[in-house]
């Protein structure tokens, strides 16, 4: 009986390790990731640059996988790669592309080679596909790490990115005057007027945007794209504001289906900064109301830092339609709506709003006090 038992023990692992695992993506609404088509795994948490143990996985039905909204992973290849991984013996090391080490992890078997590295959309989770050799057979394993659970300085999908941009420099009076003149210039002289601004300030964001819009209206798409590409490469804090503006400006309607235009202005990417998360779909947010339960909310955010808010409540035949307006700003935790009153503004006149994930998109929760809280979703133009 002992020889037969030994055969069973040896054959079992050989059958199991013959199949290679494949990576199926990260959840867009939670932390898990998918291995093959039906194995949902929890990534390993990282603490002080070390990941320990193995991911926990379980078989899941198609309905469970669907609810997790698995997103296609982003391969870390080429010049745009943010992460890389190397292996030595059983030790796997994940690092930034710059060479800064993020974590190490010990596998249970010697690692042959790293095949692929993937990052989630917000770079808060990393998956590594690698080969191992078990009982004389080479197979492929997948392991993922939750960088957001123990490391700092990484993107958090539920938090507004800290405001680290430097304050806007004081504009040269000559530039200020040139901008004012360009805004009043007649259409035939608009490009020349805005080029005069660029002659004084070559990185002026609005000037690049206005020239691009004028070229687009004149059916000169190549020249328009040249200006937009320059704007996209700018390090000016307000450059992203004008790129977001271009996404919805009627002047660029003929270019909106062009993949190059969409990539340049970021029309198809999810925002990573507070401004882009707030304004990325045009600055219009809404909450669908239900009778006697929650109000209908329409929030319109403008690039000039003003907003209009309408809260409508319907219950038992009575309708309360209340408008608000004011200004907004970004703070360390989210967005603040400032609601002016007739007297001196106080903290009570400010309504904090924070971003939070709903399915695969951002929502914004605002608290206006007096039991008025709402969660609005972006309205796509």
Image (spheres, helix red, strand yellow):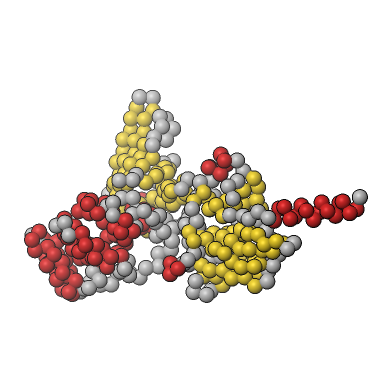
Q: Quadrant of residue 202?
A: bottom left
Residue 275 appears left or right of 304? right
Question: In the figure, 65 relative to 96: above or below?
Answer: above
Q: Quadrant of residue 51?
A: bottom right
Q: Viewer-proximal residue, 51 or 174?
A: 51
Q: Residue 338: image x %, image y %?
A: 33, 52
Q: Residue 316: image x %, image y %?
A: 38, 24
Q: Quadrant of residue 102?
A: bottom right
What residue is drawn where x is 42% and y is 35%? 294
What residue is drawn where x is 57% and y is 40%? 62
Q: Viewer-proximal residue, 321 or 38?
A: 38
Residue 75 appears left or right of 311? right
Q: Is residue 344 visible?
A: no
Residue pushed farthest top?
Answer: 317
Question: In the figure, 144 relative to 48: above or below?
Answer: above
What residue is drawn where x is 42% and y is 43%? 375
Q: Is residue 47 visible?
A: yes
Q: Residue 167: image x %, image y %?
A: 33, 69
Q: Viewer-proximal residue, 284 or 87?
A: 87
Q: Residue 290: image x %, image y %?
A: 41, 32
């Amino acid at each position: 009986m002992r020889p037969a038992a030994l055969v069973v023990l040896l054959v079992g692992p050989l059958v199991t390790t013959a199949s290679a695992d494949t990576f199926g993506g990260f959840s867009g609404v939670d932390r898990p990731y998918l291995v093959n088509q039906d194995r949902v795994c929890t990534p390993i948490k990282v603490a002080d640059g070390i990941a320990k143990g193995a991911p926990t996985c379980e078989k899941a039905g198609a309905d469970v996988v669907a609810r997790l909204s698995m997103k296609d992973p982003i391969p870390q290849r080429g010049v745009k790669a943010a992460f890389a991984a190397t292996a030595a013996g059983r030790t796997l090391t994940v690092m930034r592309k710059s060479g800064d080490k993020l974590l190490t992890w010990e596998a249970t078997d010697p690692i042959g080679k790293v095949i692929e590295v993937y990052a989630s959309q917000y770079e808060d989770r990393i998956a590594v596909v690698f080969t191992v050799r078990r009982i004389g057979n080479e197979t492929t394993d997948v392991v993922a790490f939750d960088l957001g659970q123990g490391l700092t300085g990484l993107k958090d999908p539920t938090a507004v990115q800290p405001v680290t941009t430097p304050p806007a420099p004081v504009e040269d009076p000559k530039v200020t005057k040139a901008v004012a003149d360009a805004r009043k210039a007649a259409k035939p002289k608009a490009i020349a007027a805005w080029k005069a601004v660029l002659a004084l300030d070559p990185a002026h964001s609005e000037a690049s945007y206005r020239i691009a819009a004028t070229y687009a209206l004149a059916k000169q798409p190549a020249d328009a794209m040249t200006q937009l590409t320059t704007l996209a490469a700018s390090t000016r804090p307000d450059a992203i504001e004008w790129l977001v503006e271009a996404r919805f400006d009627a002047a660029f309607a003929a270019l909106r289906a062009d993949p190059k235009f969409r990539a340049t202005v970021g029309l198809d990417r999810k925002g990573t900064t507070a401004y882009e998360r707030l304004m990325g779909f045009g600055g219009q947010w809404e909450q669908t109301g239900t009778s006697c339960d929650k109000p209908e909310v329409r929030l319109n955010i403008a690039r000039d830092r003003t907003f209009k808010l309408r809260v409508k409540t319907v219950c038992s035949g009575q309708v309360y339609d209340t408008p608000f307006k004011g200004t907004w700003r970004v703070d360390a935790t989210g967005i603040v709506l400032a609601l002016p009153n007739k007297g001196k503004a106080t903290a009570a006149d400010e309504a904090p709003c924070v971003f939070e994930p709903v399915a695969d998109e951002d929502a914004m929760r605002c608290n206006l006090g007096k039991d008025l809280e709402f969660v609005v979703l972006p309205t796509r133009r």
